[in-house]
Structure formats: C-alpha cells, structure tokens
Image (cartoon, rainbow, N blue to C red):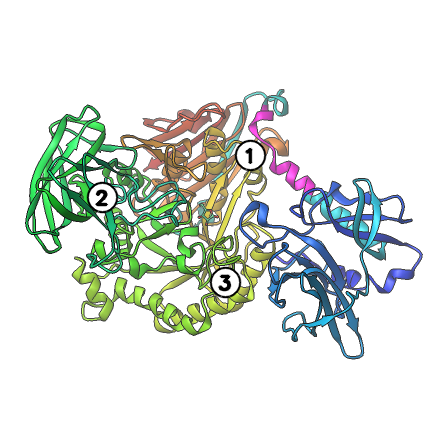
C-alpha cells in the first residue's frame, strides 16, 4: 500500500558499488549469528578498519527466512548477498540442511525486502550458495554444494534457471571471510559502502526500534507515566455538516474451527468420534476407537468392508458370545445432559448374523440411567432414530450401547443431539453459544478459517463440497490445529446460521495454495494446486456461488433446495486466500480464480489477502498485486501489542480511498501472557474508534479467534471461552458487542479537546460519533485508557431526550469486567468518562 522507498534513496543505494573507493567509504559485513541456528536471519555490522566492528541494531534482523513451518523451522543459513546489474540487492540463502532449493529475497536498500522466492534447482540439498557474474554474457552462476558434490547453475534474471552441472570448485565474486565481531568469530561477506549508506541503515533500525519501544508500552507503566496526572476536562464538538457515509458491515465475526470451536463446541453433536474416522493424522495417538471404550466380554473390531458410504470408510463391529458387553462413548469431556430435555439419538446398524437389538443408555458416573431406549437391528445397514428423554441432569454423562443378542453387530454414525439447538435446527448449533454470537449483532460471519481454510498441505485444503449433503457422505479430515473435523458443521449449516442471525455469509476459500506454514507434503508451503487441476478447483468455487445463489433448477442450486433451502442465500462476498505468502505461485492461482469469478459473477465482492502482518514483504506486494488486479477488497491480519494500537490510530487515515477496500479480518491486542482483560479490551475499543473513523475505506472487521473450549486451546486470547456447560464471554467480547450493537452508517467527525497538551496523554483518549439512519440515533463512543477521569462537555448538534449509556470499565488486569447499560441524563451535557473505560452513549431525539 505504502511504498516507503524514495527515488532519491534508490539512486543513492543503487550506487553502493560505485562509491566503493571514495574516501568516506566504510566496511559492511553481512552474516547470520552462529549462536542461534539461523533463526534471527540476516545481521549487519560495520567498521572503518575491518578490526573494530559495530553490530547494527544490536543484532537487528534485516531479513528473516519465511520458509518452513512456524518457529524453529524458519532458518537462514549461509546468506550470500550481491547487488545485481540493476543495483538491486539479492540475498540468497539455504533454508535448512535438507531442502533442494535456495531462497532469494530482493531489496533496494537492505532494509525493505520483497517476498522471498524459493528456487528448487538442486537434486539434493542446496548449501552454501555463492555467485559469480559474467558481465559480457550478462549471466549469473550460482554455486552450491551437497552430499553429492559441488554444483553450478546459470540464470540471467533469478527467475529461470538452467540445468545444474557438477563442478569442482565453489566460485564466488565475493567469497565469505571470517571477521572478529563483538559476538566472536563469524563468517560472512564484506562490502565497501558509503558512510551515508550505513548511516541510512542505522537510522532505519533506530526508527524501527523506537517504534518497537512505543509498541511495547503497556498500562503496567501507567502509575509511573501518569503519576502527576489529575482528572481531566475536555470538550467534544461534533461536526454534523462533515458527516460521511461509512460501511454498514463494519463489525462481524470470524469463525474458525480452532480450540475445538466446531466439533465439541458450536456444533451441538454430543458424541465424539461418532463415525470411527479418527486417525493418527488428526493426532498421533488417535485411532478409530478413540473416545470409545469396550466393557465386558466381546471382540471389538474396526472394519472397512461395505461401509455406509465410501467417504466414511470405518465402522465398529462388536462380537459377543452372550449379551452384556457394551461400547461406551465418553463425549467431548463428557456429555452434558439436562433433565426434562429431549435428545435425538441416531445410529446406523447392521446385524451381521441376522436380527438383533441394541439397548441405548445415557448414564451418569454412578452408572445410574438418565435415559434409555431400544432399537431393532437388521442384516442390512439401516439408519434409525429415537428420542431420549432425560430423567436427570448430568454434566458428565456417557452413552452406552449394549447389543442384546449374541453375535456380531456393526455400528456407525452414532449421534446424539439436544433437540434444543439454536433455532431448533436439526444437526444444529449449541443454543447458548450460538446465542452469545448472535448477541454481538455481527453484520457478517467469515468461515471456516483462517488456516483451516487453506489447510496444512494440498490434500488438507478445505473443500466446501466435502461438507454438504448427508452427514455420512461428508468427507472428514484432520484439523491442522491438532484434532478432527467431522464436517457436520458444514457449508449449509454455516449459511443457515448466517441467515438465522441476519449476518452476511463470508466464506473463505484457499487461493489454490495451502497454509504457508504447512508441515506436510515436504515443506508444504506454496505448494500450489497443480496447474492442470486448477480448472477443476476454480469450477468448485464457481459452483459454490451457484449453490448459494442459483435457482432451484441449476445443478448446485438444486442441491441447496434439496437440503431444505430453496430460496437463495444471497451470497455477496467471497474470500480467496488467507494470509498467504504473496509469491508467484500464489499470484498465478489467485489471478485465475479472481478473473473466473469476476467473469461469471461480477456482482460478487472478492476479498483478497495481503499477508499476516500490517507491514512487510507480503503486505507490500499483496497490496500492489491486489491494486494492479483491481481486487475490490483485501483481508488484513495483525495480532499486535496494545501499544501498537495506541500508537497507530492514524493507520488507516492515509489509506488510498480509490484502491481496494479493507477487511480487517483478524486482529487482537496481545499482551505478554496473552490475557484477555480490561487493558486489551479497552485498547481494542480505542483502535476501533480510529477504524470507525475510516469506515469509508475499512468495510469490515472481525476479532480473532472467536471461540475456545477451555482445556483445548491452541491459541490465546480468544473472544469467548466455554466448557460443556458454560459460556464465558471475555472482556473483549463486550467491546465487540458495544460496537456491534451500536453501529451506524454515517460518521460525524468530532473534535475532542483535552485541557492537557501532552501527546502521551492525548493518544489515550478517543471518541467516535456515528449516526444510525434507521433509527436516527446519535451514537457517541468514548474510550479512556487513562488512570483518571475525563469530564467531557458534549457540544451536541441537536437536543436529545433519551440517552442510554453502556459502560465497560475495570482495572487494567481485570478479566471479569462486563458492560452494563442504563438510561441516563447528562447534566449540562457533560459526561465523565471513568478512568479505564469505554462508554457508548446512544441518544434519541
Ligand atoms: O486466528 C488464528 C489464526 O491466525 C488463523 O487461523 C490464521 O489466519 C492466523 O494465523
């Protein structure tokens, strides 16, 4: 979006070699720190005499490897820096000891880097890259080594490469040398550059470190920072004449099956591993019998011959010599049963030796029966359903299945749902959790991920067609967060839920590439769907639009109607990609998908992706690419320290109003230890005030992640925690709710004038004023991160008789605070913002 490099800078840096011999030149040394296994990436040091070295930024990482899965695998080994004939810097490096590729990143100034490319040129590994340049032939030769020897491969442009050939020696125009740095002897490369260039690099690093220090400001230092601060006074002047139209879909939710959000969470199914499809891809120690237990004298086998559906290949067979043995399901942390409620039980059975019957019981830990029923079983697969009436409540019940006849009984798709699901839908959602989501008043729901959408490796890309139709025909798969996806909560259920809560559906589909952090399938990342399969993949996406919006006579619209929804779902948005690396592999596939959708369904708003951060290579290239292509909206993600939010309230003020719009699809304030408390919630409220001000360019936002089952979290903080019996909204939930329930479609600029000129103080207070044209209510949101009150005189454009105040306040570390709402009158039109508070004043004329 914002290109920082100036033309002047480019010219000056482009001449680095040319000035190498002038008097003010110094030495620059590039290296990786040998003490951290390449995880800190490229470091630079400078010296005027090659003996006394200064490390720039105390080991500041100028470039980090983006290759491999999260964390430890992202390594940079033996970087080789060169300036090509256009003056552009290349950093070639090995990513690890095994992969048959080297990485190439380019930069104009060694500080700002473009996305990395990985060139799979080698047969074996690709270590110690070095380069020579033949100016006459305008060709670079890249040398590398591995167990089979030394190799050389030619390129003119670092994009296409010749065939590697064996060679005796590894040559280099600038061989690595060893220097004595303050951290010890280190191997790297030596360059002569101008002092000005080093000065520039140091300034860039200083600025970055200063920004980092601002970003790490937290309320923990408030006692010191604001020790002399007394309660403040302020005036708020609203400027209705400057009102601008803003997005009416600003606050939504992002549902991803992470932290057991779907199976064992929002999806109301109570039986775990109902289909015996768990396996060790889900989790190393899991298998088809996980969550089930055999008691009594019987043989229990998992079989695959003649399953109920090819997508549901496994089932259980229990063989007894005399009745008495049982299979017990432990549910997800037990089964929560409420007295007086009805439960829909269903099962597929096949009595392998004629006819039989099955006793179904819900029991408590004392083995007392809570509910029971009996069904008959025949020699062919047959689905049967029965309603269980709960006579007692139990948080930790189990389901016990006892064959009533000796012989062999096959069972599959053992299911138990409360009838009391959200809106009483069959195959529905947990009512309390779904209602908590509905209470946020989200304007849209993004699903099914996140990383889940693009999956861990090509075969784990989320395919929507696998998630519709009869439950037994849905194709289950592993969840990259470490468990199993039944797909019982599938596309139909997601769309139905959106309709039930009046939110726009926003499905996100992979851009033909799996998660950039994929660990399966070699190194996974950017291992795009083969080009010859892309047409089929694109057709799947077009089919989704037909399924959602097509007439009942269309192929896919008919399937929607058969599932129970003849009316179109009126899909308007579709996300393509999720914080992918913006490489050639991504761009090729995204462009194909985007153009196909645009051609067939120009009315659909396609939302692209610009990487996982608020800046950096993928962000820059993602924005440039989306702008070039004319993508209407892009999805930004950033999980940041609260200090970042406080210090970036102008982030969107500079955004180009004519380019793609923004969907801030994932964000949250992350404090050390990752709590969700008053500090994070208020900071998010403060930042959202700046987003609302920019809601002409930011069209949508969603906090992430949304749901987390206690004891099963892979990510913290989340917005709503839950157990089988309780829903626990966090403090941050109330921030979202206060924005969601008090959205407007017109933004009224306002001026908040504090009687205090300290910038440090002023940036802790924010106001956003909107009008909701449906009700004509004026909505004033006021956030105060200071430890003192701010008494604010409101200069309102009109008289308002009814004012409702919703307030969220508490100590910064408080994790239990929640909002309260009451009618108020404002004496002398003055509202006193409590210390550490977020207030919404909703005013009716
Ligand atoms: O929200 C959790 C994860 O964060 C999402 O799956 C992914 O998009 C991001 O990295």
Does the stretch in magenta take in 647? no
Whole-Å distance between the Cαs marked 3 and 2? 40 Å
Please tell me which of labels 3 and 1 falls first in the chain: 3
Please tell me which of labels 3 and 2 falls first in the chain: 2
| Number of the label disc, if any, that sits on residue 527 | 3
Q: Eyeballing the image, is 273 above or below 632?
A: above
| Number of the label disc, if any, that sits on residue 753 | 1
Does the stretch in magenta take in 215? yes
Whole-percent x, y for residue 206 in the image: 73, 43
Query: Can residue 717 be seen in this snapshot?
Result: yes
Q: Are marks 2 and 1 in contact (CB under 8 Å)?
A: no
Point 62% across, 20% down: residue: 227
Query: Would residue 470 be found to the left or right of residue 21 on screen?
Result: left
Nearer-the-camera pick, 339 or 627: 339
Whole-Å distance between the Cαs marked 2 and 1? 74 Å
Nearer-the-camera pick, 827 or 413: 413
Q: Residues within 10 Å of mark 1 (few under 14, many from 20)?
A: some
Please tell me which of labels 2 and 1 falls first in the chain: 2
Whole-percent x, y for residue 433 in the image: 28, 38
> Looking at the rendering, in which quadrant would you find the N terminus?
bottom right
Quadrant of res 571: bottom left
Q: Eyeballing the image, is 684 above or below 198?
A: above
Instruction: Report which residue position mark 2 lands on.
Output: 300
């Amino acid at each position: 979006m914002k290109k920082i490099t100036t033309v002047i800078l480019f010219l000056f840096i482009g001449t680095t070699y040319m000035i190498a011999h002038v008097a003010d030149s110094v030495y620059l040394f590039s290296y990786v720190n040998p003490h951290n296994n390449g995880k800190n990436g490229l470091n630079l040091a400078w010296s005027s005499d090659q003996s006394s070295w200064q490390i720039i930024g105390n080991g500041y990482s100028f470039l980090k490897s983006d290759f491999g899965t999260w964390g430890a695998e992202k390594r940079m080994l033996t970087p080789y820096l060169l300036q090509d004939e256009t003056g552009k810097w290349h950093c070639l490096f090995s990513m690890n000891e095994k992969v048959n590729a080297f990485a190439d990143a380019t930069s104009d100034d060694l500080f700002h880097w473009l996305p990395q490319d990985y060139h799979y040129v080698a047969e074996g590994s690709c270590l110690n890259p070095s380069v020579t340049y033949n100016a006459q032939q305008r060709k670079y030769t890249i040398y590398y080594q591995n167990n089979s020897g030394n190799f050389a491969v030619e390129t003119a442009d670092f994009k296409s490469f010749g065939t590697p050939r064996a060679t005796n020696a590894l040559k280099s125009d600038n061989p690595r040398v060893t220097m004595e740095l303050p951290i010890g002897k280190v191997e790297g490369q030596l360059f002569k550059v101008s002092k000005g260039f080093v000065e520039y690099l140091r300034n860039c690093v200083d600025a970055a470190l200063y920004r980092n220090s601002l970003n790490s400001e937290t309320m923990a230092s408030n006692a010191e920072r604001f020790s002399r601060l007394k309660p403040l006074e302020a005036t708020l002047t609203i400027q209705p004449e400057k009102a601008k139209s803003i997005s009416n879909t600003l606050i939504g939710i992002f549902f991803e099956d992470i932290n057991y959000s779907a199976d064992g969470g929002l999806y109301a199914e109570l039986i775990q591993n109902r289909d015996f499809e768990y396996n060790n891809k889900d989790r190393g120690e899991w298998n088809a019998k996980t969550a089930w237990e055999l008691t009594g004298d019987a043989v229990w086998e998992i079989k695959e011959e003649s399953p109920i559906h090819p997508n549901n290949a496994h089932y259980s067979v229990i063989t007894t010599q005399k009745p008495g043995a049982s299979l017990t399901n432990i549910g997800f942390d037990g089964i929560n049963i409420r007295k007086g409620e009805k439960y829909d039980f269903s099962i597929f059975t096949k009595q392998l030796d004629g006819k039989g019957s099955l006793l179904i019981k819900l029991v408590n830990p004392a083995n007392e029966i809570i509910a029971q029923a009996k069904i008959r079983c025949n020699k062919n697969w047959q689905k049967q359903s029965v309603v269980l009436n709960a006579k007692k409540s139990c948080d930790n019940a189990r389901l016990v299945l006892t064959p009533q006849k000796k012989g062999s009984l096959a069972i599959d798709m053992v299911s138990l749902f409360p009838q009391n699901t959200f809106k009483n839908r069959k195959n529905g959602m947990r009512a309390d959790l779904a209602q908590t989501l509905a209470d946020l008043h989200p304007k849209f729901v993004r699903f099914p991920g996140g990383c889940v959408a693009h999956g861990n490796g090509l075969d784990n890309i989320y395919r929507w067609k696998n998630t519709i139709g009869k439950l037994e025909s849905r194709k289950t798969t592993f969840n990259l967060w470490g468990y199993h996806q039944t797909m019982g909560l599938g596309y139909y259920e997601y769309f139905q839920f959106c309709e039930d809560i009046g939110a726009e559906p926003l499905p996100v589909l992979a851009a033909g590439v799996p998660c950039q952090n994929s660990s399966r399938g070699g190194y996974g990342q950017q291992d795009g769907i083969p080009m010859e399969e892309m047409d089929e993949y694109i057709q799947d996406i077009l089919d989704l639009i037909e399924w959602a919006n097509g007439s009942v006579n269309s192929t896919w619209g008919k399937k929607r109607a058969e599932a129970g929804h003849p009316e179109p779902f009126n899909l308007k948005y579709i996300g393509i990609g999720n914080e992918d690396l913006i490489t050639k592999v991504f761009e090729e596939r995204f462009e194909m998908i985007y153009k196909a959708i645009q051609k067939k369904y120009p009315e659909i708003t396609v939302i692209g992706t610009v990487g996982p951060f608020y800046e950096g290579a993928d962000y820059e290239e993602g924005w440039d690419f989306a702008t070039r292509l004319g993508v209407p909206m892009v999805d930004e993600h950033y999980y940041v320290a609260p200090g970042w939010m406080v210090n970036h309230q102008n982030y969107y003020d500079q955004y180009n109003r004519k380019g793609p719009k923004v969907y801030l699809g994932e964000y949250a304030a992350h404090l050390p230890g990752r709590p969700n408390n008053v500090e994070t919630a208020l900071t998010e409220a403060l930042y959202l005030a700046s987003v609302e001000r920019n809601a002409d360019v930011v069209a949508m936002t969603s906090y992430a992640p949304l749901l987390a089952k206690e004891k099963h979290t892979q990510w913290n903080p989340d917005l709503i925690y839950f157990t089988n019996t309780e829903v626990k909204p966090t403090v941050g939930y109330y921030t979202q709710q206060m924005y969601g329930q008090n959205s407007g479609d017109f933004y009224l600029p306002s001026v908040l004038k504090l009687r205090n000129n300290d910038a440090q103080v002023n940036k802790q207070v924010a106001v956003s004023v909107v009008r909701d044209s449906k009700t004509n209510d004026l909505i004033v949101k006021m956030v105060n991160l200071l430890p003192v009150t701010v008494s604010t005189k409101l200069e309102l454009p009109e008289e308002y008789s009814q004012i409702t105040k919703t307030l969220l306040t508490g100590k910064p570390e408080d994790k239990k605070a929640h909002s309260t709402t009451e009618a108020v009158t404002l004496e002398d039109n003055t509202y006193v913002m409590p210390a550490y508070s977020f207030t919404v004043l909703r005013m009716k004329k």
